[in-house]
Image (spheres, grey):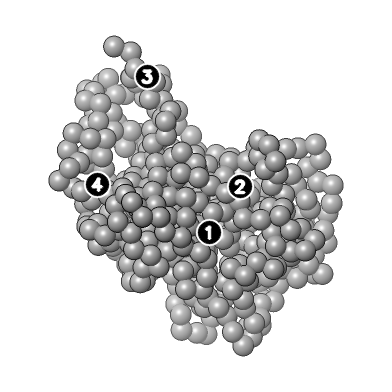
Amino acid sequence: MKHHHLPVSPATVHWGYFSKAVAPALTVRSGDRATIETLTHHAGDDYDRMIAGDPGAESVFHWTREHKAVVRRGAGPTEGPFLRGSGEGLGVHLLTGPVAIEGAEPADVLEVRILDVRPRPSCHACHAGRCFGSNAAASWGFQYHDLIEEPKPREVVTIFELDTTGEPFARAVHNYVWTPQTDPDGIVHGTIDYPGVRVDQTSVRRRENILRNVRVPARLHFGTMGLAPSEADFVSSIPPGHTGGNIDDWRIGKGARMYYPVAVPGALLSVGDPHAAQGDSELGGTAIETSLTGDFEFILHKQADLGGTILEGLDHPLLETDQQWSVYGFTFPNYLAELGPDAQTEVARHASLDRAMRDAFRKMRRFLMTVHRLSEDEAIALMSVAADFGVTQVVDANWGVHGSLRKSVFTCT
């Protein structure tokens, strides 16, 4: 076993997409471990607290009229003129990687074990050693066209501080209503529509003393982690799919094991969208977006060895913890294959929890019948009385439902 370190820099991140065409930032063997740094794409919501003085973050977010360190942000066009910027924000998450796995081939399964997760502290002199994150009640949120207070509609950014001195929790610091921001290239962003725009704090009115007497339990996890799909060279990081991606399940944290079907040689794992806390549904648009560092272990399961294991026939992401298994249903199990050449822009028009629930049911049924050798009638009975189905997210275009089953239900003989 070898232990690697993958820091953040313009050379080790890609912004807003998964890609089979990007050269690996790191190559590992099955059994290797790696410490991987990740940054939140929302750090510009409070530059002083989440970027200033941090060499890695400053290098990635550097953007002046003369130089933009990471030019492409999203799977959209890279030739102007642009409405928002290169990549057009068709995909927003800062992802570290890709990590190539030696010997990985399509139809294999990659197991990613999350051994530890740690917050990335602020380096600003006024906030040094403290950890911060941002939540956006945004235009893509479930609530955006269902507000009751003025102004309507509106986007609101809330900055949180993470306390890790004991059982970790987050407290709100302040919030503000998004006002149009002009980026260094002169493009005006009337909404939160392009990642990495630095908010001019003199242009917004901060509201203090919010969410008083509220402590949000921390659930450090990675909202977006997965493998490169085969269907296109550049795939938006927003909709999750059959090779993982933006699943946004708070259970994908320390102690979790994620299994992903390999679609391209090398597997090409990317990880990012780090979260301090999130509820099921991520209703308003984001979690508490923060920067995290994780320790990972990679295990490659070859296709020839999958028979008779929990990975037999796996064609979707699967979560395993010490206590449970979870499957993930989406509006479209593989939207890239199902919706054709315009899939990445079309998928949001069809978002449906009904279809996501149907997909989660089918995946859990297959899991119980294949892995636990239950009949269909047995599987349906067990799902109805022991499985927990919940709304993973309603903000990522390809909406998600997770189905979880406790391992302890199989301990009786």
Q: Is residue 214 above or below residue 162?
A: above
Asked where in the image residue 263 lies, by quadrant, the reply is bottom left
Tell me the CA gap for discs 2 and 3: 30 Å
Q: Which residue is mark 3?
A: 409
Tell me the CA gap for discs 1 and 2: 12 Å
Q: Nearer the viewer, residue 37 or 373?
A: 37
Residue 379 rendering spot, x and y as whole percentages: 29, 24
Tell me the CA gap for discs 4 and 3: 26 Å
First in residue order: circle 1 vs circle 4: 1
Q: Nearer the viewer, residue 166 or 317?
A: 166
Q: Which residue is mark 2?
A: 276
Q: Which residue type carries mark 1?
A: Thr
Can residue 8 be seen by looking at this rendering? yes
Task: Give residue 301's mark.
Answer: 4
Residue 285 rendering spot, x and y as whole percentages: 60, 52
Q: Which residue is mark 1?
A: 38
First in residue order: circle 1 vs circle 2: 1
Residue 321 rendering spot, x and y as whole percentages: 42, 34
Q: Which residue type carries mark 2?
A: Ala
**Lateral position of residue 382 relative to residue 161, left or right:** left
Q: Quadrant of the C terminus?
A: top left
Helix or strand or loop: what does disc 1 sit on? Answer: loop
First in residue order: circle 4 vs circle 2: 2
